[in-house]
Amino acid sequence: MPGRSGPTRKPRRIMALAVTFVAVASLASPVGAEPSVGDVLGAIVRVQSEIDPAARTANSLGLEREGHGVVIDSSGLVLTVGYLILEAVSVTFTEPQGASQPARVIAYDHNTGFGLLRTARPLPVTPMRLGDSGALKVGSDIVVIGSGGMKNAIRAKVVARRDFAGYWEYLLPDAIFTQPLFRDFPGVALIDTAGKLVGIGSLIVRDAMQQARMNPANMFLPIEALKPILGQLLATGRSQSPRRHWIGVYTREHGNRVFVTRLADEGPGGAAGVAAGDIIVAVDGKPVRGQIDFYCKIWALGGPGVAVPLIVLRQDGELATLTLASRNRHDWLRLGATP
């Protein structure tokens, strides 16, 4: 676990993890179908991507991104967190044995945060089976595993299940929050006690249980959010869920108030006169009470292209009424060959 080291700790951790995978999985699966420790570890690969300096996300997410991915079928399909590969010009995998090969981005879904890649050739590993993230409750035992084998794995617990709102106009229902922290979190695998994949690592958050005191934890994308759209992502590179429009306004919540922190370059918010430091008071005349409420109100107005009327409180105490011409986020991003 993080913060613990030394020769007396490591063997105990390895043994405990092995028991979690082997003993419990053998009870949950038919004879002959149990995922072994080697199967689970072998399905997790290292993902590295390079981003064009002109990409919209270059400054915020970096030009070189690195994390993990999970092989989920026999043809080399790899599931990861979408921001690792967003606007990538090249992606490389490192297999558990150390060999590297290029991969192709085949899907990105902003609504859920998932990304899909396909390797140039099938990988010599047993694909990870998808579990039931809906069965995870507060207190459930799970294992967090990154690429690199047992040394990059920890036992953890689910400490919260709740909706998560991100400053980048993102809302994920029923996200999974775990402790202790796994520092190398992007795309890391969340594994249940049957050895199945139930989540993909996305973030470190400071307020997992929404308490006044700091409560840092990892946030995972639940695998149940992938299942309804996986076929659509494979067929077209995007889900067929209703398109959410985008206004290019980055916010944070404090005391149920929504503060504008910055504006996207060449985005609708900046063009309409929204400014950093504004407080968003109302959407279409309806009061805003928190970030989730803000997103729900703007998306209820319609899809990309819809007018978004806002009332904002300026730093000088004046109210301003603004109308934003919303857009499709994908048209603003510089995706190139990326879906």
Image (spheres, grey):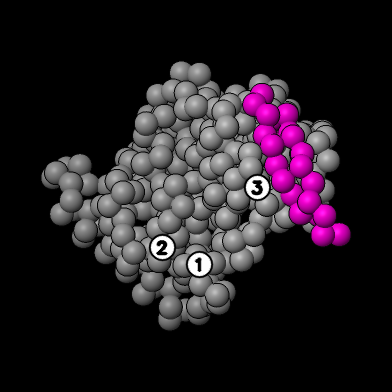
Q: Is residue 194 above or below residue 77?
A: below
Q: Which residue is mark 1?
A: 210
Question: Which mark is on residue 303?
Answer: none
At label 2, the amino acid type is Ala
Q: Earlier in the sequence, mark 2 or mark 3?
A: 2
298 w.r.t. 281: above or below: above
* Secondary structure category for the residue under label 2: strand
> Percent position (x, y) of residue 140?
31, 63
Please tell me whether mark 2 or mark 3 is closer to you in this view. 3
Q: Quadrant of residue 54?
A: top right
Q: Which mark is residue 160?
A: 2
Q: Is 230 situated left or right of 303 in this image? A: left
Secondary element type, mark 1 = loop
| Picture coordinates of residue 234, whole percent (x, y) | 46, 23
Q: Residue at x 40, y 24 (%)?
A: 231
Q: How far is the residue under mark 2 from the one under mark 3?
A: 30 Å
143 left or right, relative to 172: left
- Is residue 126 at all visible to an observer of this figure? yes
Magenta region: which residues? 305-326
Sequence-wise, the earlier of marks 1 and 3 is 1
Q: Which is closer to the viewer, label 2 or label 1?
A: 1
Write down the residue under mark 3: 282
- Residue 206 in percent (x, y) is at 57, 67
Predominant SS of the magenta segment: strand
